[in-house]
Image (spheres, helix red, strand yellow):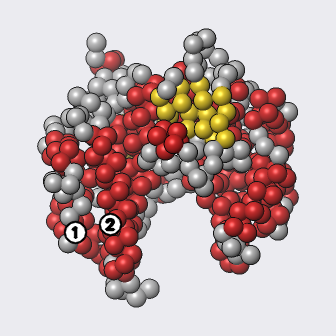
Amino acid sequence: MDERKYNMAEEVKVFSTWASPFALRVIWALKLKGVEFDTVHEDLINKSPLLLQYNPIHKKVPVLVHDGKVICESLVILEYIDETWKQNPLLPEDPHQKANARFWAKFGDDKVMQSIGGGVLLKEGKEQEEGFAASMENLKYLEEEIRGKKFFGGETIGLADIALGWLAHYLDIVEEIVGLKLIDQEKFPSLAAWKQEFANAPIIRENWPDRDKLVTKYVVVREANLGKGTPK
Amino acid sequence: MASDQVTLLDLWASPFGMRVRLALAEKGVKYEYSEQDLVNKGALLLQMNPVHKKIPVLVHNGKPVCESLIIVQYIDEVWKDKAPFLPSDPYQRAQSRFWADFVDKKIYDFGRKIWTEKGEDQEAAKKGFIDSLKLLEGELGDKPYFGGETIGYVDIALVPFYTWFYAYETIGNFSIEAECPKLIGYCMRCLKKETVSKSLEDPKKVYDFVVMLRKKFGIE
């Protein structure tokens, strides 16, 4: 039974930016579940009054508004989406497997993104070497976890895939900008295979932000962080 | 289940470990407590948490669960017939998850800076800490607990940090109660519950522990 047909008044809005990998998670989850929604495009330099009203604490995207109910923080939003629209579940039923999926999603945000974003993209010289070494360690753990599986979620895309999915597009951009290879096919064959599989999966492949625009954006971000940009 | 084997790898002073102890106490789960040496990490810890090599780790029938809030959710889902931590409504669950995440992002980080930093950095941390507690007071409102009439997910995430308040205050030279009397009142209310008082450590002992850590790390 398609419950959506009986909820004609259901209103779903996603506050996002074109580049945000976090907002992208929410868009993927809604599209994978076939939920219709409107996107409100934000400019983080000029945040809309509505965004500031909906997310006064963090003042960030994404924000999900479902029939007037406001939810912030991408991983919190993902769990809300999974519990509200039950088709194509993102999390397994079994509590231990669920905990495992949450663990890898959190590992992605706490460690992988930090080491690759903060440690490699935004650094140079010795600091970048250290960031690179930390990234290699973190990617090694992901390699072990994905080995033998099509997705982190098993046969289908799950919460951890969505949380780590930025690696399948944004990582190439980081590698191009800094001239370093992170997910080397020889070092991380299973992770490289997952990257391909995820990047080309239905829905996912249709929603990546523009690559060239991202390169331009992250070059600016990198330069600014290294102090080569416009003096403050 | 009578055949459940539950072990908690932990460090007595850890507020993250206390979250798990409180969660297990709320559900009435019997478990073996295993104090860990984090300087010379044991084989079991390294085997059960190879990625982070940290506590707490819950080992349930031989299978590990890591990261305190993930463990608390796991406990809620496995022992689901008693004392639910999260509400059943998805929107209210999302609110609880948001605020527990807020505690992780703000309270721990600012608190840590209070005892590890000096001068301007320490002052900034104190301000951030108090501002965050005030936001939590706002969220609590008139409810006895964040979970409503009973202790819930956010309470479990937050109240163990109370045991570190005395250390923050003494080292940071400020009074949390003067700034956030409502929050302190809330903590006192929680401590009246046996599950809370038996799961939380003595703040004075925690302070001695923090003093020892500061000496060890060469922070004045």
Residue A180's label in the rendered image is 1
* Dot 2 or dot 1, earlier in sequence: 2
Q: Helix, strand, or loop for circle 2?
A: helix
Where residue B108 sits: x, y (%)? 63, 54
Instruction: Name the amino acid, label 1.
Output: Leu
Q: Helix, strand, or loop for circle 1?
A: loop
Please name whichever residue, B139 or A104, is drawn nearer the observer in this view of the structure. Answer: A104
Quadrant in which residue A171 is drawn: bottom left
| C-alpha gap between disc 2 and disc 1 | 9 Å
Quadrant in which residue B130 is drawn: bottom right
Please name whichever residue, A143 or B35, is drawn nearer the observer in this view of the structure. Answer: B35
Where residue A48 sits: x, y (%)? 44, 58
Relative to residue B60, is residue A162 depicted above or below? below
State which quarter of the image contains the C terminus of chain B: bottom right
Residue at 61%, 34% in the rendered image: B8
**What chain letter is assigned to the residue under label 1?**
A
- Crowding near pointer 1: few (<14 within 10 Å), some, many (20+)? some
